[in-house]
Image (spheres, rainbow, N blue to C red):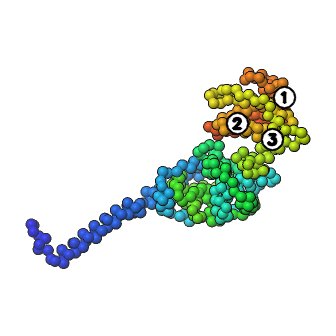
Amino acid sequence: MPGSDERDPPALRRDGAGWLFVLLAAIAIVAVLHASGRGPGADAAIRPHPVAPPPDVVPAVLPTELAPVTEDDARTENAHIPLVKKGFVAARPFVYPGNGDNRARARDCLASAMLYEAGDDAKGQRAVGQVVINRVRHPAFPKSICGVVFQGSERATGCQFTFTCDGALDRRYSDAAWTRARALADRMLSGSTDPEVGLATHYHTDWVRPYWSDSLEKIAVVDTHLFFRWPGYWGTPGAFRGAVAGSDGPVAKLAALSPFHAAALAAPVELAGVDAKAEIGETRIVPGSGGGAGRDALYVQLDHRAAPESFVATALRLCGDRPYCKFMGWTNPVLKPDSDAMSETQRAAMSFSYLRDDKAAFEKALWNCTEYKRDDKRQCMKR
């Protein structure tokens, strides 16, 4: 009926105005929270609940691609990710199965990850070291310490630990810092653990947002680093039972920092009277012999007096920064080809070969084992 509000009791009119004020205030609060990303459901919008991979399918290891957000926004979004403590389990002690130079190379790979990822800080280093060890036990990752640390490092993008492909290794830490990192790495290869990060296989700093973090569970925070595991079976103790290799081969990127890697890549020539560069004779570059433009082949005369391990250093030096390099060397100058038209006899006389293809993520060095005996038969050329 027209004009009915004028006949309403005064108390009812006051209550109606009060409810209207409360409603408008609630709307304003929701709007502010929504604008700041903290409204109801904001966490779900930032990060959907991780989906557990099937127990019979080993999860894929994704490259570290970062979302295009500012550091402040990344910190805010990362802070909203809930910390999952249900089912949190510390890792079992790990004892490296190899010995001698293999152990020394594994230790230096682990120490390099700990030092370059966490700096000269024991707490952060232990956390990083535990992630490396967790990975080497998990079937989704390589089965050696060096293989885990340098996974994907042959590419500009795709490396699992950023220090292996972003130029950080050009920076030098003090001898004292290296000594501390190596000592801690030694202890972790002998059973020491970091229970704070549990079975984490991934981590990142709080000022970035990798896309893979949306599919994992955040289980620990160590200073500015966030640690994650896979949801479901692949984040439980049962998944961390992979056989670990006790053989860690040399890594060229560590040659300048580790004598154990350097010695395996290029053993020094110790024969009296031999020039340190005598292993390099005539070098010819044959355009396109590698199978296309930019895929040249290097035909090199090698010194038969040189240590066979030094041929790797020769190949790396001559290949330089080429993304593709096919290196072939002969110690017999009579059988070294003068052109790319190589006879079967000349091919059989090849002493050493090295092939690097960054695009295919491939690198291989092979010796003529009738000329140079190798302990590892996988390093022998096929005949």
Sort mark 1 into few (<14), some (14-19) or many (20+) by Cα contacts within 10 Å: some
Q: Nearer the viewer, mark 2 or mark 3?
A: 2
Q: Is residue 23 visible?
A: yes
Q: Quadrant of the C terminus?
A: top right
Q: CA distance from mark 3 to mark 1?
A: 17 Å
The percent position of residue 198, horizontal first and vertical second, equals 63, 62
Query: In the rendered view of the protein, which quadrant contains the N terminus?
Result: bottom left
Dot 2: what SS? helix
* Three-letter amino acid code of the residue under disc 3: Glu
Amino acid tagged 1: Asn
- Which residue is farthest left? 2
Residue at 75% over, 30% down: 283
Mark positioned earlier in the residue sequence (3 or 1): 3
Q: Which residue is mark 3?
A: 309
On screen, residue 56 versus residue 1, left or right, reads right
Question: Closer to the camera, 20 or 363?
Answer: 363
From the top left corner, tell me how far across and down residue 194 is, in percent.
Answer: 66, 64
Q: Secondary structure at mark 1?
A: loop
**Residues marked 2 and 1 touching at CB (< 8 Å):** no
Q: Position of residue 375 (x, y in %)?
A: 83, 42
The three-letter amino acid code for the residue at tag 2 is Cys
Secondary element at image label 3: loop
- Are there few (<14), some (14-19), or many (20+) residues within 10 Å of tag 2? some
Q: Is residue 140 visible?
A: no
Could you say which is closer to the camera, residue 133 or residue 358?
A: 358
Q: Which residue is mark 1?
A: 332
Q: CA distance from mark 2 to mark 3?
A: 16 Å
Residue 150 at x, y = what percent?
Answer: 67, 48
- Mark 2 or mark 3: whose residue is earlier in sequence: 3
Residue drawn at (83%, 44%) of the image = 268
Q: Which mark is residue 319?
A: 2
